[in-house]
């Protein structure tokens, strides 16, 4: 018997970052939107824990116990006093090291799939608790839709969305380390007064109304200057997308994936084609959101 879970990527339509805390983390106001690019995690009983992966850039995915899917299986097994003997197979479609929470999605997917396979009967709250232990973005990968994350991003409040938002994502030729981007954020902000992070009322209203123009006017990412400092070529990708008619352009999370909000699927196709022709990115994908969080896709 095997169980497959399907988990979406995310884009941060707002990422407000506070000053570094004594523990090295940063308080965030993180408005997540799940979008329809998915990883699938299939779990099958095995003598010992094993991870395999296929799909774009699968060679960049760790296959040892540092993989978030493996860590999720171990955490659930320990909580219920059982062996984590399972084969985790990850079918990647979310960009690797792209700021779209692909690793977090795999953690949430493995958790949901192992819970179903082992019939642990864990409550939603227990699963979210394990997700928060695994990483800041993992709880949202479980929940999906749209949500405001505070603290490190793991304390979630679901948000209303009044329609579908259409996006184009441009993948860069190399990855960016999230810790490195935060370190650069700290360096760039040294000696300045960094305000407490807070969600934008205009942005939350735009999401609730399903208004892409209002959302385009309100999106923001406090990590974008740091990402551009470490990866200056991303500025050319952002400019190419805007020139092609995107309503707005921003770095997704810690990058280096860049995100372009457009009005409709036809606009998405045109912007995607222009971005590819610009030569400023490796590949492009289109997707819409909100999308559901981690769900069982097959048994």
Image (tube, rainbow, N blue to C red):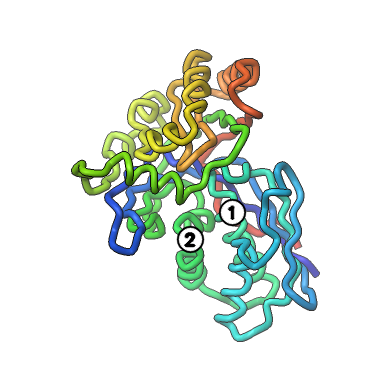
Q: Position of residue 277 (x, y in %)?
A: 64, 16
Q: CA distance from mark 2 to mark 1?
A: 10 Å
Label 1 neighbour load within 10 Å: few <14, some 14-19, many 20+: many
Q: Residue at x 59, y 48 (%)?
A: 8
Looking at the image, which residue is at 38% across and 30% down?
A: 215
Q: Residue at x 68, y 44 (%)?
A: 93
Disc 1 marks which residue?
A: 103
Residue 169 shown left or right of residue 132 in the figure: right
Most extreme residue toward the left is 193
Q: Which quadrant of the structure image shows residue 112?
A: bottom right
Say whether disc 2 or disc 1 marks the residue closer to the N-terminus. 1
Above or below, 170 against 131 in this view is: above
171 or 1, nearer to the observer: 171
Check disc 1 and report its element: helix, strand or loop.
Answer: helix
Percent coordinates x, y for residue 224 in the rendering: 40, 35
**Seen in the image, is 68 located left or right of residue 90?**
left
Disc 2 is placed on an element classified as: loop
Do the CB atoms of the residues marked 2 and 1 lie less than 8 Å apart?
A: yes
Residue drawn at x 59%, y 68% is: 72
Q: How many marks?
A: 2
- Seen in the picture, residue 107 relative to 37 is either above or below; the reply is below
Q: Quadrant of the N terminus?
A: bottom right
Question: Toward the viewer: 260 or 62?
Answer: 62
**Residue 52 x %, y %:** 76, 59
Q: Residue lying furthest bottom in this view?
A: 81
Q: Nearer the viewer, residue 282 or 266?
A: 282
Asked whether residue 207 is in view, the answer is no
Residue 98, percent from left and from top: 56, 41
- On residue 135, the disc is 2
């Amino acid at each position: 018997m095997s169980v497959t879970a399907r988990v979406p990527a995310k884009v941060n339509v707002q990422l407000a970052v506070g000053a570094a805390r004594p523990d090295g983390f940063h308080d965030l106001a993180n408005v997540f939107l799940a979008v329809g690019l998915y990883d699938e995690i299939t779990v099958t009983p095995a003598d010992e824990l094993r991870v395999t992966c296929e799909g774009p850039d699968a060679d960049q995915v760790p296959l040892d116990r540092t993989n978030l899917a493996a860590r999720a299986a171990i955490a659930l097994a320990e909580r219920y006093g059982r062996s984590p003997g399972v084969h985790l197979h990850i079918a990647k479609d979310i960009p690797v090291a792209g700021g779209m929470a692909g690793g977090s999605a795999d953690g949430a997917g493995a958790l949901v799939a192992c819970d179903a396979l082992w019939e642990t009967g864990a409550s939603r709250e227990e699963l979210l608790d394990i997700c928060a232990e695994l990483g800041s973005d993992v709880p949202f990968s479980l929940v999906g839709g749209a949500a405001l994350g505070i603290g490190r991003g793991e304390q979630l409040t679901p948000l209303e969305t009044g329609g579908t938002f259409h996006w184009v994502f441009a993948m860069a030729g190399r990855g960016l380390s999230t810790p490195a981007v935060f370190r650069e954020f700290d360096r760039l902000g040294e000696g300045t007064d960094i305000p407490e992070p807070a969600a934008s009322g205009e942005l939350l209203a735009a999401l609730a109304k399903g208004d892409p123009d209002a959302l385009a006017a309100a999106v923001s990412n406090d990590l974008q200057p740091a990402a551009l400092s470490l990866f200056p070529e991303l500025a050319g990708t952002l400019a190419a997308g805007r020139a092609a008619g995107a309503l707005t352009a921003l770095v997704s999370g810690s990058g280096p994936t860049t995100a372009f909000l457009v009005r409709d699927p036809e606009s998405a196709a045109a912007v995607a084609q222009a971005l590819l022709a610009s030569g400023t990115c490796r590949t492009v994908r289109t997707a819409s959101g909100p999308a559901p969080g981690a769900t069982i896709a097959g048994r």
